[in-house]
């Protein structure tokens, strides 16, 4: 109640959590389960980056991590006295692919938890999974499916796919987080689901807009840097044989 | 060669944008509670958050209080934390990539030799 009062006066009595779960919200089984899943996926990413990536990806990993860290600091207000910020998993995977994209997200969450006490260290497995890997895997493959169904080489396909996948990844992250909280008996599932999904419908729009802005810049300036680059200059008209209409 | 200097330019530009965001935009971030925060308050489980979490055992806690550097004026505390955090993530992610990705493999041709770009 003291918290509520000080929030009303505009002060921040304790950490901004975003979708960052602090220590104490998840029980032991939920903590362990999310750690195991995250570590398994990270191991897979380490192996695939080692096997498949080339030297020129390395600086991009640094840039992408730096941008997502910085962007996550910027909470944007949404109607109803709440705020949200970019998660960035889908964006990272669009640029770097799911493997290097995931590692970039892992670096961001480790720095946040260790240096800035943002997100609990025990909940790091859950936070990496929810805010990172859901975007870099589910978000990425959804983006890929939508983009290839509209046209891999068309900006319209790129734009719709990026925005839709970014929004969806935030919704899925919020819903998975609700399940983890309910599983841990922190809050009943129905309540958690409605409340988390409700706010994140709006936060996801922010995610979609930021993702779209960055993707649009790269599509115009350096499309060759995308993990799945368009095969032709995007502005060129497509040969009739390839174009679906 | 031209390609590599274009890549370097992109890296410099990208890092600069990140630093500008972290340093100059961070003070304007909304201080409203965000998604999970808000739900935790509305349904009264915010008090379950550990008061003395393990992260407080690390020496970083004596330097940073969340996204604010301790012992400096308020106006620079968050921008400074943003600066350090952005450079740290950049450096660590770069190093992770460097350690994993094999050096230039002469057998692997990264891109087609210049034949008119």
Image (cartoon, coloured by chain):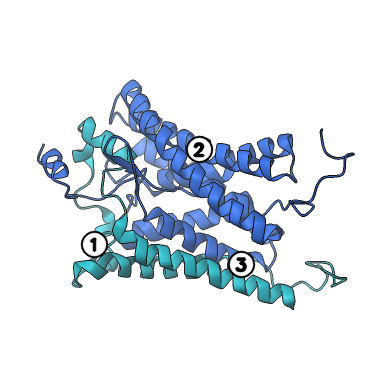
Q: Classify mark 2: residues with Cα within 10 Å, few (<14), some (14-19) or many (20+).
A: many
Q: Which chain is blue?
A: A
B18 with respect to A78 (left or right): right
Residue A39: where, in percent of width, then height? 50, 49
Q: Nearer the viewer, residue A44 or A91?
A: A91
Say which element carries label 2: helix
Residue A201 visible in the shown view: yes
Residue B99 visible in the shown view: no
Q: Nearer the viewer, residue A91 or A34?
A: A91
Identify the mark at residue B65; answer none if there is no mark.
1
Q: Which chain is cyan?
A: B
Residue, disc 3: A58
Q: Nearer the viewer, mark 2 or mark 1?
A: 2
Q: Chain of mark 3?
A: A
Say which element carries label 1: loop
- The answer to whether marks 2 and 3 sit on the same chain is yes
Q: Chain of mark 1?
A: B
């Amino acid at each position: 109640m003291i918290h509520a009062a000080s929030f009303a006066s505009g002060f921040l009595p304790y950490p901004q959590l975003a979708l960052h779960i602090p220590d104490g919200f998840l029980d032991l089984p939920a903590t362990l389960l999310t750690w195991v899943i995250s570590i398994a996926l990270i191991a897979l990413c380490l192996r695939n980056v080692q096997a498949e990536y080339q030297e020129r990806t390395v600086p991009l990993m640094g840039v992408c991590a730096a941008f997502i860290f910085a962007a996550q600091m910027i909470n944007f207000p949404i109607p109803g006295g709440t705020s949200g910020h970019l998660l960035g998993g889908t964006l990272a995977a669009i640029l770097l692919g799911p493997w290097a994209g995931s590692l970039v997200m892992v670096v961001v969450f480790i720095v946040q938890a260790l240096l800035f006490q943002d997100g609990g260290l025990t909940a790091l497995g859950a936070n990496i999974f929810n805010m990172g890997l859901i975007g870099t895997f589910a978000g990425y493959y959804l983006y890929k499916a939508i983009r290839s169904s509209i046209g891999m080489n068309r900006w319209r396909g790129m734009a719709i796919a990026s925005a839709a996948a970014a929004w969806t990844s935030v919704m899925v992250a919020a819903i998975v987080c609700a399940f983890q909280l309910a599983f841990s008996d922190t809050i009943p599932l129905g309540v958690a689901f409605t409340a988390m999904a409700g706010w994140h419908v709006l936060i996801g729009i922010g995610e979609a807009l930021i993702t779209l802005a960055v993707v649009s810049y790269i599509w115009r300036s350096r499309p060759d840097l995308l993990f799945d680059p368009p095969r032709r200059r995007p502005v060129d008209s497509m040969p009739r044989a390839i174009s679906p209409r | 060669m031209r390609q590599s200097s274009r890549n370097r330019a992109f890296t410099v530009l990208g890092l600069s944008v990140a630093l500008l965001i972290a340093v100059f935009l961070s003070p304007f971030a909304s201080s409203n509670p965000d998604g999970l925060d808000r739900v935790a308050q509305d349904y009264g489980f915010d008090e379950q958050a550990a008061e003395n979490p393990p992260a407080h055992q690390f020496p970083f806690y004596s330097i940073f209080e969340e996204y604010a550097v301790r012992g400096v004026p308020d106006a620079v505390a968050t921008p400074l934390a943003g600066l350090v955090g952005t450079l740290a993530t950049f450096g660590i992610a770069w190093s992770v990539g460097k350690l994993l990705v094999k050096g230039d493999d002469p057998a692997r041709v990264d891109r087609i030799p210049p034949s008119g770009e």
